[in-house]
Amino acid sequence: MPTEKARRSPAEVQKGTPGASAWDRGPAPPPKPLEWHHRLALSGRERDICELVPTRLSYKEMARILGISESTVKTNMRRILLKTGTANRYALISALYAAGFAPQLKASRGGSR
């Protein structure tokens, strides 16, 4: 003889109770907002380069910092500009901030360049 699953009263249903259905747990939490690099559909390397763009370093300096060739930086910059629909590095900086980019500020060692 098949047994029926016992129905629980709302007072018996608690969040996180094993066997509680999604309906018993209440509404789902709102989705987390996407990070800026996900909104722009950037790869990891493209994200690394975007983080250096506001510093106004040359391609050669970016390549040295990231440990890649200058041509790789140029290729990735070209892809970044296409993905963001921007024409140059200055427009890219505006697009990054509009997408929620917040640069990681590093403490300076003092002195001026």
Image (cartoon, rainbow, N blue to C red):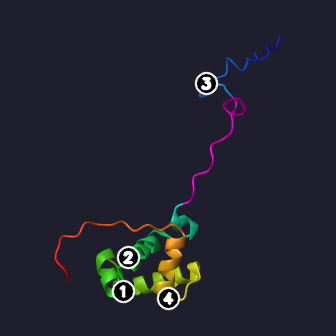
Q: What residue span does the magenta drawing correspond to?
A: 21-34
Where is mark 1, residue-wise? 59
Disc 2 versus disc 1: nearer the observer? 2
Question: Element at badge 2?
Answer: helix
User: How many C-alpha atoms fall within 10 Å of the one at disc 4: few (<14), some, or many (≥20)?
Assistant: few
- Between the residue at mark 4 and the residue at mark 3, the CA separation in whole angstroms equals 54 Å
Q: Residue at x 61, y 25 (%)?
A: 18
Of callouts 3 and 2, the N-terminal one = 3
| Closer mark to the observer between disc 1 and disc 4 | 4
Question: Circle 3 sits in a helix, a strand or a loop, which is it?
Answer: loop
Can you name the residue that lies furthest to the left here? Answer: 111
Say if mark 3 contacts mark 1, CB within 8 Å. no
Vertical order, 103 against 94 (above or below): above
x and y percent of residue 30 in the render?
63, 47
> In this picture, is 33 found above or below 7?
below
Sequence-first tag of 1 and 4? 1
**Which one is earlier in the sequence, the residue at label 3 or at label 1?**
3
Which residue is tagged 2? 52
Q: As drawn, is 58 to the left or to the right of 108?
A: right
Q: Nearer the viewer, mark 4 or mark 3?
A: 4
